[in-house]
Image: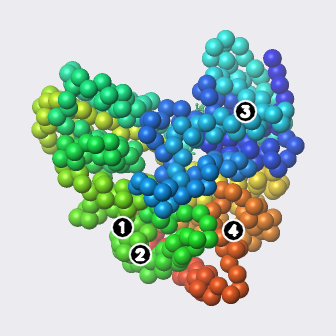
């Protein structure tokens, strides 16, 4: 069989669907979407049952379909902040996006359980039948981030017979079983999944003294208070961006920069005695951080090499553990850190981050630019790729590229208009809604403008300093 479409999108995850939604909403183009999963939603299909977005639902999903009910949580560790969709909600949302929004347009072909083999060839994983797609415009590689979750990855360490290592997905079922009274729960990994597991264990009733946490690195966390939509959070969001610019303009090192951002409340860390070296845009609330601080047994002895009957063999020594320890694997690295490539290539589009830590906004913006900017160099210029941060110092190039993109977009009337109408752009509307009599907000906006150039200048100094050392 052969079909003809304007765009062939490989990957029906968040990125592929956000791209597809904007193409369908803003043009009369046709699309084929292929994914080896049986359901839309990419990595969310494999997530643990207690997973949630770590940023508000308002900033996630596709541009034209709201996610969630726009409510603030009334209780729990996200109290007072806008809702965080659960994994189940995210999956249901993407299912609706495909089946109630994209497919009914008659301009979308969706091929689940189908492998993309390259060269426009799709192969059904069930029947083996192939479909050839003739692509009039571009193929879109929405698989670039190669997201991996614990249930799908192979740990890099060995596990001795008789020891139990499970991904977070297996936890609730295993613990309901109740046949084993675990002496200890040992969470492996320093990232957001490990934090989710720690919070879940404690909220589900585990005693903090029964939890150990293997943390090869400590992480800086974004305070969710400052990542909220809407004018009521103006001073927490735009006001905090001014404080960030001041910190960027004034810091003499990356360490000082993060300390300043911590002092202003933008960044959080779990352990005040350890300076984090990692920054992955993980977002948390003060309440979550407070819960995680209850875990005293934090094991900082490098990476796990093997789990043995006697305990953990680690790169920096051996750590004895009770024989009946339940090890929880949170060591999957979520996204692959691959080198950035140009987003717009001759017959290929590779969506990557064009705004800091906003993958779906970035995909929607990329699709809009694809539809409206003919010249490939110009399109790439408008979409500087933001590097995926790993180390704290990566905050500098990330923020610089973010500012470059924002500057370019503000100079383009069409993009300015698009941003104002974009559900996924949390802040343009908030700024546009400021009224002439709101002196406090106007003052924040003028401080923003005043601090931008000094911040850019000092980011470049700090980057040069970091490169020289
Ligand atoms: C636990 C967790 C929480 C997160 N929370 C947030 C949040 O709050 N806010 C936020 O903005 N982001 C969040 N993210 C990040 C975000 O959800 C995704 O990581 C990001 O959007 C990447 O999605 P994706 O579509 O690129 O990748 P994926 O979800 O991995 O989708 C890629 C798809 O491509 C398919 N595929 C790959 N190769 C082929 C092939 N050859 N043939 C057919 N199909 C193929 C795969 O089956 C997969 O379905 C979170 C991530 C995780 C892991």
Q: Secondary structure at mark 1?
A: loop
The reply to whether discs 4 and 2 touch (Cβ–Cβ < 8 Å) is no
The answer for how far apart the CA atoms under marks 2 and 1 are is 28 Å
Q: Residue at x 19, y 42 (%)?
A: 210
Q: Determine whether, in the image, residue 291 is placed left or right of residue 342.
A: left
What number is the disc on residue 429?
4
Q: Where is residue 281 shown, x and y percent of the image?
A: 47, 56
Tell me which numbered mark, 2 or 1, is placed earlier along the sequence: 2
Give SS at disc 2. Answer: loop
Q: Is residue 183 above or below residue 208?
A: above
Between the C-alphas of marks 4 and 3, the distance is: 30 Å
Q: Earlier in the sequence, mark 4 or mark 3?
A: 3
Rendered image quadrant of residue 267: bottom left
Real-space CA distance between mark 1 and mark 4, rounded to the nearest whole angstrom:
41 Å
- Indicate the position of residue 433 as horizontal and vertical percent values: 70, 74
Q: Which residue is mark 3?
A: 99
């Amino acid at each position: 069989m052969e079909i003809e479409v304007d765009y062939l999108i490989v990957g029906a995850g968040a990125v592929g669907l956000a791209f597809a939604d904007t193409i369908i909403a803003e043009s009369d183009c046709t699309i084929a979407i292929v994914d080896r999963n049986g359901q839309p939603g990419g990595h969310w299909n494999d997530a643990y049952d207690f997973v949630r977005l770590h940023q508000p639902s308002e900033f996630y999903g596709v541009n034209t379909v709201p996610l969630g009910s726009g409510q603030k949580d009334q209780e729990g560790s996200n109290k007072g902040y806008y809702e965080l969709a659960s994994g189940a909600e995210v999956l249901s949302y993407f299912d609706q996006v495909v089946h109630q929004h994209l497919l009914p347009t008659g301009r979308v072909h969706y091929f689940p359980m189908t492998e993309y083999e390259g060269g426009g060839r799709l192969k059904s994983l069930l029947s083996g039948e192939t479909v050839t797609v003739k692509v009039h415009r571009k193929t879109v590689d929405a698989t670039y981030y190669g997201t991996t979750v614990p249930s799908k990855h192979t740990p890099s360490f060995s596990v001795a017979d008789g020891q139990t290592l499970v991904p977070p997905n297996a936890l609730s079922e295993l613990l309901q079983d109740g046949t084993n009274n675990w002496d200890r729960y040992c969470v492996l990994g320093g990232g957001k999944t490990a934090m989710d597991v720690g919070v879940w264990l404690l909220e589900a009733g585990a005693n903090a003294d029964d939890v150990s946490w293997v943390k090869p690195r400590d992480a800086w966390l974004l305070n969710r208070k400052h990542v909220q939509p809407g004018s009521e959070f103006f001073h927490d969001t735009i006001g905090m961006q001014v404080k960030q610019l001041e910190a960027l303009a004034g810091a003499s090192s990356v360490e000082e920069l993060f300390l300043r951002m911590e002092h202003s409340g933008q960044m959080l860390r779990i352990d005040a005695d350890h300076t984090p070296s990692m920054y992955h845009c993980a977002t948390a609330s003060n309440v979550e951080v407070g819960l995680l601080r209850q875990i005293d047994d934090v094991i900082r002895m490098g990476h796990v090499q093997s789990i043995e009957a006697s305990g953990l063999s680690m790169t920096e020594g051996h750590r004895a553990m009770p024989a009946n320890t339940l090890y929880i694997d949170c060591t999957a690295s979520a996204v692959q850190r691959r080198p950035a490539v140009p987003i717009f290539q001759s017959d290929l589009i590779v969506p990557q981050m064009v705004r800091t830590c906003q993958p779906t906004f970035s995909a929607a913006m990329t699709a809009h630019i694809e539809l409206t900017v003919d010249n490939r160099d110009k399109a790439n210029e408008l979409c500087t790729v933001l590097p995926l941060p790993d180390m704290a110092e990566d905050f500098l190039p990330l923020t610089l590229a973010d500012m470059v993109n924002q500057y370019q977009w503000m100079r383009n009337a069409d993009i300015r208009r698009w941003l104002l109408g974009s559900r996924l752009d949390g802040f343009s509307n908030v700024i546009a809604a400021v009224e002439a009599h709101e002196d406090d907000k106007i003052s924040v906006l003028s401080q923003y403008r005043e601090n931008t150039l000094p911040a850019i200048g000092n980011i470049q100094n700090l980057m040069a300093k970091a490169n020289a050392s």
